[in-house]
């Protein structure tokens, strides 16, 4: 490219475009060493053009982002996914939240290459926050996002049609069973616009019934409330008309959990999307019917234990998906002079079969797994979030 000056050349004797294509093919694990070669290369690695080129050349690599917290702080790590090379977790700075200890009760969402951290609180007696912080996973840098309309802690966040929905939560130190104002039931953010819009409570919903779960199943948003008579009361949200529809035929044993959308392409090139729910060490197959949601039998805890790396059988775990593949990520601690934390990752496959009685069954198999020492600490950390994306 003629407009680049001589001192900005990336690789001597190579045109700038050719050098860019060569450098974009370098694995992400070598970017830190690559940044030490020259100032022009270091500047390139911090530019959106570099990652756009990697995407165009199909040279992106899957990376898992893990969030842990204890009573005083958060820890963030990135973990590259590679079955043929050892896992090396890289620490990431925590969000630059202005209030000390403001690290609990956040809602998390992944959209594109950005992880959104919304709301939260610091101490039990403090009010909630409506701040939003965004982690650009390309550069591992934080930036402030559009402030929410209402203060929220312990809210639910999901992504649907390129928008982020934040539902429920509380605005001060109260159990989740305490309601928010009807106008504060939820809000939605379109990143292209950068403004949060209010989502009103359904006309037929009891204002005393709190939001206890929020899921996206079959490309539709479902919000569940604990019913005073037991069980769950579910509502389906239609974003096009911004209207709610009561969903009646739902099983009472439906339990809160993370929904993972898995894309599958068969031999003929046809796409199929499968919704899996991860809840309390159990994977469930979830399908959306015209009358409501129907979840099937799942892979039980005893089966999942065989999918984890050795010594991780009783570890805290989360499931995430990437390019149609399912990954089970777990955190295990060993107590010696202090806690030694280890991260394990397994790629698993879920197959659906029908037995002789016509009952649906799920079978899980492990394709590969690795584990690596992550960090040492005298404190006890908990799993908070887990996302996988291409960078």
Image: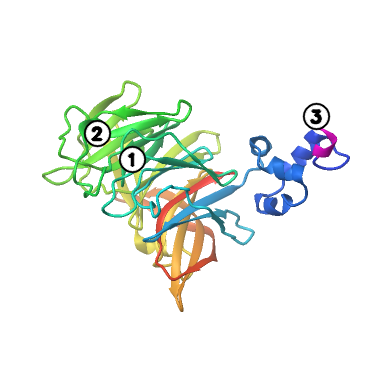
32 or 28: nearer the viewer: 32
Q: CA distance from mark 1 to mark 2?
A: 11 Å
Residue 11 occupies quadrant: top right
Is residue 281 among the parts visible in the rendering?
yes
Mark 2 or mark 3: which comes first in sequence?
A: 3
Q: CA distance from mark 1 to mark 3?
A: 48 Å
Quarter of the image where the N terminus is located? top right
**Which residue matches tag 3?**
1
Q: Residue at x 21, y 50 (%)?
A: 175
Number of on-image labels: 3
Q: CA distance from mark 2 to mark 3?
A: 55 Å
Vertical order, 93 against 7 (above or below): below
Q: Is residue 368 left or right of residue 330?
A: right
Mark 1 touching mark 2, by CB under 8 A?
no
**Which residue matches tag 2?**
235
* Helix, strand or loop under label 1: strand
Relative image position of residue 388 (x, y in whole percent): 51, 47
Vertical order, 15 against 212 (above or below): above
Q: Residue at x 17, y 40 (%)?
A: 209
Mark 1 or mark 2: which comes first in sequence?
A: 1
**Which residue matches tag 1?**
215
Estimate how packed mark 3 is, as few (under 14), some (14 to 19) or many (20 or more) residues with alpha carbons within 10 Å: few
Residue stretch rendered in magenta on the structure: 1-9
Residue 5 among those drawn in magenta: yes
Residue 346 is tagged as none
Mark 1 touching mark 3, by CB under 8 A?
no
């Amino acid at each position: 490219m003629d407009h680049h000056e001589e001192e900005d050349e990336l690789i001597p004797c190579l045109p700038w475009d050719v050098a860019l294509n060569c450098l974009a093919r370098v694995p992400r694990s070598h970017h830190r060493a690559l940044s030490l070669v020259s100032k022009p290369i270091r500047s390139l690695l911090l530019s959106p053009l570099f990652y756009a080129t990697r995407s165009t050349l199909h040279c992106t690599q899957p990376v898992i982002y893990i969030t842990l917290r204890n009573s005083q702080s958060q820890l963030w790590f990135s973990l590259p996914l590679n079955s043929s090379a050892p896992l090396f977790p890289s620490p990431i700075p925590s969000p630059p939240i202005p209030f000390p200890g403001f690290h609990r009760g956040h809602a998390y969402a992944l959209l594109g290459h950005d992880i959104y951290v919304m709301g939260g609180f610091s101490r039990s007696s403090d009010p909630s926050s409506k701040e939003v912080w965004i982690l650009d996973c390309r550069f591992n840098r934080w930036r402030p996002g559009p402030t929410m309309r209402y203060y929220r802690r312990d809210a639910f966040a999901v992504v649907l049609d390129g928008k982020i929905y934040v539902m429920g939560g509380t605005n001060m130190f109260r159990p989740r069973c305490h309601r928010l104002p009807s106008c504060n039931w939820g809000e939605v953010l379109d990143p292209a616009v950068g403004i949060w819009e209010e989502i009103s409570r359904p006309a037929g919903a009891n204002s005393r019934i709190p939001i206890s779960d929020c899921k996206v199943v079959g490309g539709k948003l479902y919000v569940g409330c604990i019913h005073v008579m037991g069980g769950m009361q579910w509502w389906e949200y239609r974003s096009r008309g911004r209207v709610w529809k009561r969903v009646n035929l739902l099983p009472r044993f439906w339990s809160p959990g993370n929904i993972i959308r898995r894309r599958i392409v068969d031999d003929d090139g046809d796409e199929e999307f499968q919704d899996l729910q991860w809840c309390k060490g159990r994977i469930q197959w979830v399908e959306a019917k015209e009358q409501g949601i129907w979840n099937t039998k799942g892979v039980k805890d005893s089966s999942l234990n065989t999918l984890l790396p050795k010594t991780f059988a009783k570890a805290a775990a989360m499931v995430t998906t990437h390019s149609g593949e399912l990954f089970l990520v777990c955190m295990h601690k060993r107590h010696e002079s202090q806690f030694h934390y280890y991260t394990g990752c397994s790629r698993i496959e879920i197959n659906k079969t029908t037995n002789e009685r016509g009952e649906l069954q799920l079978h899980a198999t492990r394709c590969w797994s690795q584990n690596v020492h992550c960090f040492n600490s005298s404190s006890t950390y908990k799993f908070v979030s887990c996302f996988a994306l291409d960078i």
